[in-house]
């Protein structure tokens, strides 16, 4: 992609003031009259200005400035050469990286989520300069460029991949200025901080805490706050009966949530005194609506009566397109993290649920084998319950959708043997844009506004069903909404080690659909972990990130030559997670995301060098038996999974712990 | 010497030579300095001068005439033989000479006694007094010594080991030529007795140490996310990830987390009231795919842990338990004293 634009007046003024670029470039310099002497030395620091050396100055004998790719082009040089030539008399271009601390394009640039900015300058700015930009990704494709702040001399482009980027700029209106191309090597960013999560032993009544620490910070003691309050949380209904309730306590800015349930008695929770918490309460019984207590200090929670009133009853109807009732549909309204109770429709399609005021999304689960999709209504505009006195009724009417049955015959690797016991999962490949309508009737009357009008909300649809093949290898879905399905077969234990989880696409139409599916064989993900002579013994796991429970990954150890090969299921999404064994000089890292459709060899990957950090957990005194987990920093763009701990340790009696982290200063990634 | 001849009579009194007897220390040890003194008598009022010497054996039966006496004698009242000269039998000479030059000598053979070595056997690793965890790797060393500085011969012997044990007491792989260290990889619980026989060529002594290796303790789940005590949890059906983790497991050999841990995790899910299905994953963290469920569905999530040696026993115990949460009590397992050790925890997950 290219961008062109006129030269801004500002740069012209700069030139008029006598500023000129004297740094050399790898671009061509048209108009040079032969092999001139002089020019700036490749190593010259053009930020120093002047350029007034005798023999090394810009041309003195009619030649062009010399060109050297290694020269710095950070800033245009000021002034003229006093040894026989005015450098500004020759037009040439320079490029300056604005998003890097590197003054030139030497060295590596760490990939970030932020677009990278580059400035071009001409030694002979003209008011009519028209700039043309071309940036090429490492794979040869064109990178999208964006003019920054209406200044055509500055573009931004995304760093979406690692490798060598080619950046080219030229002034189309002044061919004599030529063009300039610079290359820039982009690498994975080096994490500067890690997220340390410390779980003190329960006996101390100190909550788990998180710290963002650099490796040098981490060498200092990790000091746990002891400003805590111990909460004993009981929950009651509005007639003071114990109310078994699931509770989840979260705090903004922390990834740690505390979950408990009062079904077995009070939940004992230590919390930090100066931190605000959200407490979600979901009674186990269907007679009381869940409640979310937001942004409360522990002191307020201690004073808070965790007595829950039933909430507001919302009744409704579940109907097919023809108005006939749908039994056993389940509806939940949700305001953020707070759900309602579950309303399940009876034979007449009627249901009731309990909720509280708010703006809510709706999830309606269609009954099995109904041929209806699950329906989803977004929270905006959503179902609005303004007050406890509102009287809402809901009508979920599914659209008239075609449905059909699907009979799958599962066969083994040989293509003929019927395979019983296989899990068969049918998932609608894409959402149904309009699966029905949810009509919200607010029958509360307001003296001023009267009865509000009904609100009709469009529901999108999804469908997923699963079953197990019978003794003949047959799995039957009696009714599914028509559409394109991904049918996934998870082989039973006896299907053989070679049998892969097999997914095929099936177009389901009205009526009976049958399909025989033979299992496919596993495929191989292979690669080399560098440095190859040192990575032998690293455990590498392919973690299946698919949405089918029961889909296992694979794991192996890297061979002595650095190579690995994992037998995995084709078409699945995997994270490749490398875990060095004790004593190996590397940190843990996610090596790649991969979705192999056949045997696949991944590019070599250099494991980050390990940095051993020894520190101490203290809370006034040393804390023994504290679990320390270290995760990628949340802002890391190379961390392919922030839920996988980079290191774990338990503090010793003296509070000390040692973790081996990926060295932020070490190169990691694809060499 | 008294002599008579004819009618001549010497009027001067006849000088009687002194007599000397070597006085020995109570015990002379090999390699240890020994000091001798002399018991001297004479007829003169002036005490005789005493000279000493040490010679190798054989010693003359008697001191004989002075021509046989060793030269380079040392004049002193006592005589100390350096430790380096007492390693083997030797002769001590003492010569007493009065002021008239009359002399007498005594010589005695000295046979120094051997000092037996002192045997010392140390447990270098594991640290601590024991009892030791199952499969402990021991490293023993000798700090035996010999006061005589005799070269020592060390003989190691595994004198006792538990029934069924095939463990060997052997040179350590990192010091295969060192006689002073030995390694033992215990393979069964019970007592191992290690004998170290130390010999200086003359005497031998034995040092003995017994180490007791415990049975492999069962792994006990300490903490999880969500807290297993919650039991019933309500999770957002639309959440992208529903993560369950075993944070910490106490175990002697395979504590979690630890780089050397060989702890196994077995995750099972029973979806929508169905049968429990093992998920075939052996990680401490499990991701439940919420998208596989509808609102109102429930799932049972369980995790069992097993260490490197007790998998079969744990499997048997858990099969008998059959519950979401299973603990082994002291009564169920005699050793270890791990009352309430959690081998399995579980959650009921409700999706809304």
Image (cartoon, rainbow, N blue to C red):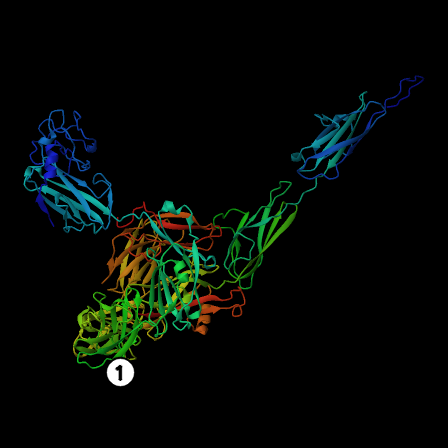
Identify the residue shown where x is 11% and y is 28%.
Answer: A86
Q: Please, which chain is the residue tagged with disc 1 on? A: A
Residue at image location 50% in from the left, 50% down from the top = B172
As drawn, the residue found furthest toward the front would be A447
Left or right of A2: which side holds B293?
right
Question: Can I make out residue A473 in this image?
Answer: no
- Rendered residue at 40%/51% (across/down): A659
Residue closest to the eye, B273 or A571:
B273
Q: Note whether B16 is above or below A232 in the view shown.
A: above
Q: x and y percent of residue B74 in the render?
A: 71, 26
Residue at (68% x, 42% y) in the render: B114
Residue B35 position in % (x across, y down): 72, 33
Q: Is residue A204 positioned above or below A450 on the image?
A: above
B30 vs B235, nearest the viewer:
B235
Crowding around mark 1 (Cα neighbors within 10 Å: few <14, some 14 to 19, many 20+) is few
In the picture provided, is B281 more to the left or to the right than B326?
Answer: left
Residue A275: give x, y in percent of width and height: 37, 55
In the rendered image, the vertical position of residue A122 relative to residue B154, given as above or below = above
A487 or A315, nearer to the observer: A315
Q: Can you identify the residue that label 1 sits on? A: A347
Taking the image as shown, residue A226 lies to the left or right of residue A633, namely right
Q: Looking at the rendering, which quadrant does residue B278 occupy?
A: bottom left
Q: Position of residue A516 (x, y in %)?
A: 22, 75
- Observer able to see residue A326: yes
Q: Secondary structure at mark 1?
A: loop
């Amino acid at each position: 992609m290219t961008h062109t634009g006129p030269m801004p007046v500002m740069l012209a003024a700069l030139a008029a003031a006598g500023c000129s670029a004297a740094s050399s470039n790898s671009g061509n310099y048209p108009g040079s009259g032969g092999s001139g002497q002089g020019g700036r030395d490749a190593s010259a620091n053009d930020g120093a200005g002047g350029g007034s050396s005798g023999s090394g100055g810009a041309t003195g004998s009619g030649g062009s400035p010399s060109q050297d790719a290694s020269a710095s082009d950070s800033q245009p040089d000021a002034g003229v050469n006093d040894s026989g030539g005015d450098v500004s008399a020759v037009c040439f271009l320079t490029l300056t990286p604005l998003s890097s601390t590197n003054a030139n394009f030497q060295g590596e640039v760490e990939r970030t989520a932020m677009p990278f900015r580059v400035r071009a300058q001409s030694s002979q700015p003209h008011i009519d300069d028209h700039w043309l930009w071309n940036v090429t990704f490492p794979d040869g494709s064109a990178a999208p460029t964006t003019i920054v702040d209406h200044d055509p001399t500055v573009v931004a482009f995304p760093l979406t991949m690692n490798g060598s980027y080619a950046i080219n700029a030229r002034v189309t209106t002044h061919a004599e200025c030529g063009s300039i191309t610079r290359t820039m090597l982009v690498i994975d960013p080096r994490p500067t901080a890690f997220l340390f999560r410390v779980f003190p032993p329960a006996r101390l009544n100190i909550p788990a805490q998180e710290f963002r620490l650099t490796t040098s910070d981490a060498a200092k003691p990790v000091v746990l706050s002891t400003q805590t309050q111990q909460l004993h949380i009981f929950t009651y209904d509005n007639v003071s009966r114990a109310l078994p309730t699931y509770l989840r306590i979260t705090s903004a800015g922390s990834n740690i949530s505390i979950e408990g349930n009062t079904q077995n008695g009070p939940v004992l929770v230590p919390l930090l005194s100066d931190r605000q918490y959200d407490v979600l309460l979901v009674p186990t019984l269907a007679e009381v609506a869940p409640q979310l207590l937001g942004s409360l200090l522990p002191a307020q929670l201690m004073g808070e009566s965790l007595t829950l009133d039933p909430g507001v009853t919302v009744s409704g109807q579940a109907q097919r397109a023809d108005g006939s009732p749908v039994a056993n549909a389940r509806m939940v309204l949700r305001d953020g993290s707070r759900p309602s109770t579950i309303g399940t429709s009876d034979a007449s399609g009627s249901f009731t649920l309990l909720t509280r005021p708010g703006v809510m999304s709706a999830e309606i689960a269609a009954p099995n084998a109904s041929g209806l999709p699950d329906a989803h209504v977004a929270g905006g505009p959503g179902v609005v319950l303004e007050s406890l006195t509102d009287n809402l009724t809901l009508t979920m009417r599914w659209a008239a959708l075609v449905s059909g049955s699907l009979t799958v015959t599962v066969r083994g690797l040989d293509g003929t043997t019927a395979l019983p016991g296989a899990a068969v999962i049918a998932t609608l490949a894409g959402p149904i844009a309009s699966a029905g309508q949810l009509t919200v009737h607010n029958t509360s009357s307001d003296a001023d506004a009267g009865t509000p009008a009904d609100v009709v909300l469009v529901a999108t649809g999804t469908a997923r069903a699963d079953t197990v093949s019978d003794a003949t290898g047959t799995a039957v879905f009696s009714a599914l909404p028509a559409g394109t399905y991904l049918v996934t077969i998870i082989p039973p234990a006896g299907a053989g080690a070679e049998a892969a989880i097999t997914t095929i696409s099936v177009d389901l139409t009205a009526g009976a659909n049958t399909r025989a599916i033979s299992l496919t064989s596993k495929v191989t993900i292979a690669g080399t972990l560098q440095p190859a002579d040192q990575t032998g013994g690293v455990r590498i796991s392919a973690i299946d990130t698919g949405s089918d429970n029961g889909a296992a990954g694979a794991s192996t150890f890297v061979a002595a030559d650095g190579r690995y090969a994992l037998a995995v299921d084709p078409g699945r999404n995997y994270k490749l997670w490398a875990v060095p064994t004790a004593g190996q000089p590397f940190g843990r890292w996610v090596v790649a995301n991969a979705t192999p459709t056949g045997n696949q060899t991944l590019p070599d990957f250099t494991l980050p060098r390990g940095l051993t950090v020894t520190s101490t957990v203290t809370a006034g005194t040393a804390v023994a038996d504290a679990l320390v987990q270290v995760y990628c920093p949340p802002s890391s763009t190379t961390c392919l999974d922030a839920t996988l701990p980079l290191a774990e340790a338990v503090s010793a009696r003296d509070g000390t712990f040692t973790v081996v982290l990926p060295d932020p200063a070490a190169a990691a990634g694809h060499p | 010497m008294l002599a008579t001849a004819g009618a001549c009579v010497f009027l001067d009194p006849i000088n009687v030579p002194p007599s000397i007897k070597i006085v020995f220390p109570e015990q002379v040890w090999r390699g240890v300095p020994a000091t001798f003194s002399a018991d001297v008598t004479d007829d003169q009022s002036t005490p005789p001068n005493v000279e000493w010497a040490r010679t190798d054996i054989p010693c003359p039966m008697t001191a004989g005439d002075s021509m046989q006496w060793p030269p380079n004698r040392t004049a002193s009242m006592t005589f100390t033989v350096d430790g380096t000269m007492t390693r083997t039998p030797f002769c001590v000479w003492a010569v007493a000479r009065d002021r008239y030059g009359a002399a007498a000598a005594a010589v005695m053979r000295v046979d120094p006694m051997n000092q037996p070595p002192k045997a010392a056997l140390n447990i270098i690793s594991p640290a601590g007094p024991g009892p030791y965890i199952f499969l402990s790797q021991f490293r023993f060393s000798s700090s035996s010594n010999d006061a005589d500085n005799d070269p020592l011969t060390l003989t190691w012997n595994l004198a006792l080991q538990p029934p069924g044990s095939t463990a060997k007491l052997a040179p350590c792989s990192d010091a295969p030529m060192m006689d002073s260290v030995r390694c033992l990889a215990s393979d069964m619980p019970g007592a191992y007795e290690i004998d170290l026989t130390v010999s200086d060529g003359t005497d031998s002594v034995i040092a003995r140490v017994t180490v007791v290796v415990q049975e492999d303790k069962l792994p006990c789940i300490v903490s999880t996310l969500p807290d297993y005590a919650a039991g019933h949890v309500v999770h957002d059906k639309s959440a992208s990830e529903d993560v369950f983790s075993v944070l910490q497991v106490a175990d002697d050999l395979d504590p979690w987390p630890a780089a050397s841990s060989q702890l196994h995790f077995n995750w099972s899910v029973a979806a929508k009231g169905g049968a429990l299905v093992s998920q075939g994953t052996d990680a401490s963290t499990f991701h439940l795919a919420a998208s596989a469920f509808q609102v109102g569905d429930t799932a049972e999530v369980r995790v069992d842990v097993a260490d490197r040696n007790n998998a079969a026993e744990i499997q048997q115990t858990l099969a008998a338990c059959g519950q979401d949460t299973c603990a082994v009590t002291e009564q169920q397992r005699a050793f270890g004293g791990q009352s309430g050790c959690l081998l399995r925890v579980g959650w009921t997950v409700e999706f809304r």
